[in-house]
Image (spheres, helix red, strand yellow):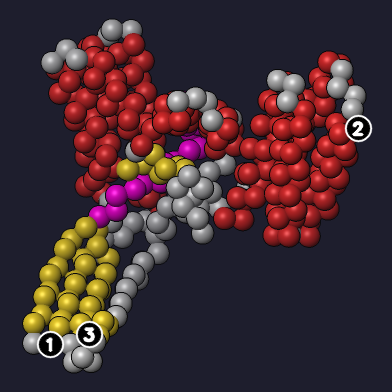
Amino acid sequence: MSVATVPFKMKPLCGAVIVLALFVTFSAQAADNKDRITAETDIQPLVTLTDQESQAISLAAGRILLHTDNARIAIAAKDKKTAMEEVEQGLTLVKLVERSLPKYKITTKITTGDVTYSDEDEVSRRFVTVYNEQFIEDVIAPVVHEKAKTLKGRHGHKSTNSRFFEDYSVWRQASMKLNVVMADNALNLAKNELKKGNLDTADLTLALLQAEGVVFEFDEVELPLTEAADDLKLAQLELSEGKIDQAQATLKRASDNLKKYERISGDSRAKDVRELQKEIDKLGKSLAKGDHSENALEKAGKKIASYWERVVKWFK
């Protein structure tokens, strides 16, 4: 599985009792072959969740992001009172989530010779899966928009990858996770800045939560499909800008990614994937032959848009 900019999809914790134990032993030996060090780490769950509890926590995480965006909208309207109310609502949900998250006991023991270190910690999860059956546009769209702005700011221009962030209909197929610790810190900081009347600073803090406090995760099986969708959208853009050679190369990448997806998509879908590959390859050859009139490019762009729509429908 792959994580973060190309993350993997996880389900919320289920109701069954989770037995989680991790034991790691490793040794490091000095050149004289006498010194030896070992480490043992044991992780045990102290609290587990039912399916209903997991869903409630996930829904709360989504509402935190909803109130975050509502607060930013109020700040843009110079409505300090409403912004503060939205931030307070978000903080209430953060408290509910933090008190309900599963806890784990971590026991660590490190030994070398006759010296032993041991310690116990009680920790809870930092990231919570956002329940995305409701408020899809209201929750996901603002986050994706802010991530795209952040990416543009880092590179000084709108990069190729930032195009994909704008097509958040694809991101709807991903698992979305909220960093609860960061949400707590950001909302409290925004609250303090609002009290001081620093609306711009409060907004910046909330924007940071949207851009950096949320992680999207894809199922590893769907990664080639995700990349193919990205390539098709980019090819459509390049064609509209008259960048024929670049569009051809991007279509080739889309076809290659679909070939990867075909191998893991299963017999029932492989035939449809192969058919789409052929259509993409045919369009690429047609562009190479040379009818680059405005009408021809417009038709080609519409074809690519239809290819993208077919790819998006294949997401689980």
Q: Is residue 120 above or below residue 70?
A: below
Does residue 17 appear in the picture of this structure? yes
- Say what amino acid the circle numbered 2 marks: Lys
- Most extreme residue toward the left is 114
Residues rendered magenta in the picture: 124-140
What residue is at 55 percent from the left and 35 percent from the top?
161
Residue 289's disc number: 2
Is 134 covered by the magenta stretch? yes
Separation (CA) of disc 3 from disc 1: 12 Å
Location of residue 298 in the rendering, given as x and y in whole percent from the top left corner: 81, 19
Q: Is residue 289 above or below residue 201?
A: below
First in sequence, mark 1 or 2: give its number: 1
Front: mark 3 or 1: 3
Q: Secondary structure at mark 1?
A: loop
For this view, does 260 lie left or right of residue 284?
left
- Most extreme residue toward the top is 78
Q: How many marks?
A: 3
For this view, does 35 lie left or right of residue 156?
left
For this view, does 170 lie left or right of residue 80?
right
Q: Between residue 294 and residue 75, name the one nearer to us.
A: 294
Give the residue at mark 3.
30
Residue 255's disc number: none
- Say what amino acid the circle numbered 3 marks: Ala
What residue is at 81 percent from the left and 46 percent from the top?
277
- Say what amino acid the circle numbered 1 marks: Gly
For this view, does 266 lie left or right of residue 62?
right
Separation (CA) of disc 1 from disc 2: 74 Å
Q: Secondary structure at mark 3?
A: loop
What residue is at 19 percent from the left and 71 percent from the top?
107
Q: Between residue 25 and residue 285, name the one nearer to us.
A: 285
Give the residue at mark 1.
113
